[in-house]
Amino acid sequence: MPDPEHPVPSPAWNSGPGLAFGGDYNPEQWPADVRLEDLSLMKEAGVNLLSVGIFSWALLEPREGEYDFAWLDEVLDNLAGAGIRVALATATAAPPAWLVRKHPEVLPVTAEGTVLERGSRRHYSPSSAVYRRYAAGITRKLAERYKDHPSLALWHVDNELGCHVSEFYGPEDAAAFRRWLERRYGSIETLNEAWGTAFWSQHYASFEEIIPPGAAPTTLNPTQRLDFQRFSSWVLLDYYRSLLQVIREVTPDVPATTNLMVSSGTKSMDYFDWANDLDVIANDHYLAAADPERHIELAFSADLTRGIAGGEPWILMEHSTSAVNWQPRNRPKMPGEMIRNSLAHVARGADAVMFFQWRQSYAGAEKFHSAMVPHGGRETRVWREVVELGAALRSLGPVRGTRVQSRVAIVFDYEAWWASELDSHPSEDVRYLDLLRALHRSLYLRGITVDFVHPSAPLDGYGLVLVCTLYNVTDASAGAIALAAEAGATVLVTYFSGIVDENDHIRLGGYPGAFRELLGISVEEFHPLLAGESVKLNDGGTGSVWSEHVHLAGAEALNTFTEFPLEGVPSLTRRAVGQGAAYYLATFPDRDGIERLVDRLLAESAIEPVADADFGVELTRRRAADGSSFVFAINHSGADASVRRVAGTELLSGAPFTGTVSAGRVAVIAEQ
Ligand code: GAL
């Protein structure tokens, strides 16, 4: 247990006895009697943190320059009276009608030139100078009014930046893109070189000639697309920073964040690039109800969120208590699933569990989205589970501030996700996440936790480093990966990695240019497989998606293709490097092949699971600076499961851990 002499300092957003607990609170949708009932229900559930005012601009400023803060004053005063802390929103995620009528130029424009109108939300472009001025205005008003309010613990800047629309193609966006390119390249000739514009008569005489890569007859310039993707991520961050500047001026001591959307489905923002501007990383995560392995996708999202947070604890800012309203079929969560989901995020580094939203709306587009207080009120399964979760989180105070343990790194790069999936490539079936997630899944099922690490971050301390589809890579990052192998790590590089530099220019002289030397191989030609095709491998397994003509140049072949025209050509290689080793994988193995590969990599790097457990138990360990540690054992199966090699006090029950986790339940063991 943590040393009581040196307690972990609590951030303002997490000052309760346990972990922070709450959700989005939209009191403006409800009359006074319901708002009063909210306070007693929040007390019953143990809520201590709420995001307030996210979509309330039109009520706070009903006409330009006319403000109505009375309702928000009352809400914040009541919450403060109830001891509930607030992540106060800047209210900028949905501009009011008067603003858009006066300035229709703030509206987003799509690649096809369609203007996206008001009537839903997020109807503004982050490049718009006019929008930024108004958004900074309401943010300043809120900051000045509530800067000394006792409930204010955190700023919630805008909401899910880049949600619904993440690329903007209007005239002001195009001008901002040009200015960004001028700063990046300095001269138009440098841009011409980087974009390879000698091709297809794309040479530019000045920055003024450049437009965003919108609708076009055929394949657009890939470097232009990559740069537009970089710009689009940056301009959303830059808009965030413009609001942060106001917040810092008025409330320099209040931390600020914005809720990210880290998942296998969100590709458009380079969140590693955003992390430094967020005082604490906050994430929203929703399960795909139709995915039978949705708990593994959750683990992927939570691990990646922790990677973006540099290993620091983070806030789960939104997830759902049960069904959402925006999937084709919105199934409720199964009994117990919401508590497992919540604690799985905590197991992977979250120190706060929050939901969209506190009370289920009775009107509007989200009235069929679940909430902490359902339409049916207190006499519901969802409410009972919410109350149970609140109690569980209260008992997890000792976990606060601890860090998740991992000796496996997956190098993760949003730029590689963007660039590897551009069109006119050898195969549209090479998708950045597929092999990466197959490896993550295998490790997850074995009770081995993975850290996601940006290519520019240090790899010290990792015994196993997985480099998946890192198509574009800088010399510096490729060098750091090679050094990790020299220093003793087992490194795996998978096909279509190291092919191009940061400008998407081929590294000449044989693939995979950036890793050829490290791996001791050279690839002469790619042989992508047809849809549904597979090839036989010498070990009896099969490969799909990809094959290629690999030559050995210092490595040994561990497995080979067996079919014409690649019979005898290596499909898996290994080279001893310094204190470690470098493996290369030239195809997408079947499930057994993935398991054999992971067995081998773990044996070589001497990495063991957190504990021994029956199938279906998710395992992680969080460790405090003083050495005390906590094992999370989450039983996703329908049968009681045994967990061996762990002893201590089970925090949710307060009793000694028996070695069994009941079907569908969770144990958090403070180890002795
Ligand atoms: C998020 C959003 C919330 C709510 C939620 C519904 O994208 O931030 O405001 O709409 O989805 O799942």
Image: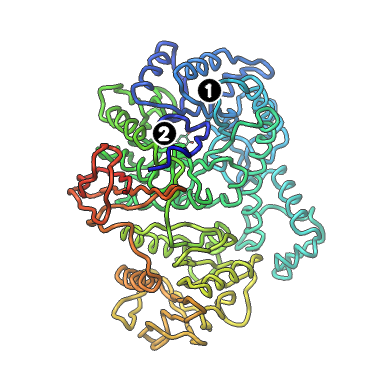
Residue 10, horizontal then vertical, whole percent: 50, 35
Question: Secondary structure under badge 1?
Answer: loop
- Crowding at mark 1 (Cα within 10 Å: few <14, some 14-19, many 20+): many
Way the structure is coloured: rainbow
200 lies above or below 213: below
Q: Which residue is mark 1?
A: 151
Mark 2 or 1: the one toward you: 1
Residue 283, horizontal then vertical, whole percent: 48, 42
- The numbered mark at residue 355 is 2
Q: Amino acid at mark 1?
A: Ser
- The numbered mark at residue 652 is none
Number of numbered labels in the structure image = 2
Q: Earlier in the sequence, mark 2 or mark 1?
A: 1
634 left or right, relative to 279: left
Residue ID at (39%, 88%):
568
Q: Is residue 17 visible?
A: yes
Give the Cα distance between marks 2 and 1.
Answer: 19 Å
Residue 159, horizontal then vertical, whole percent: 54, 35
Q: Amino acid at mark 2?
A: Phe
- Crowding at mark 2 (Cα within 10 Å: few <14, some 14-19, many 20+): many
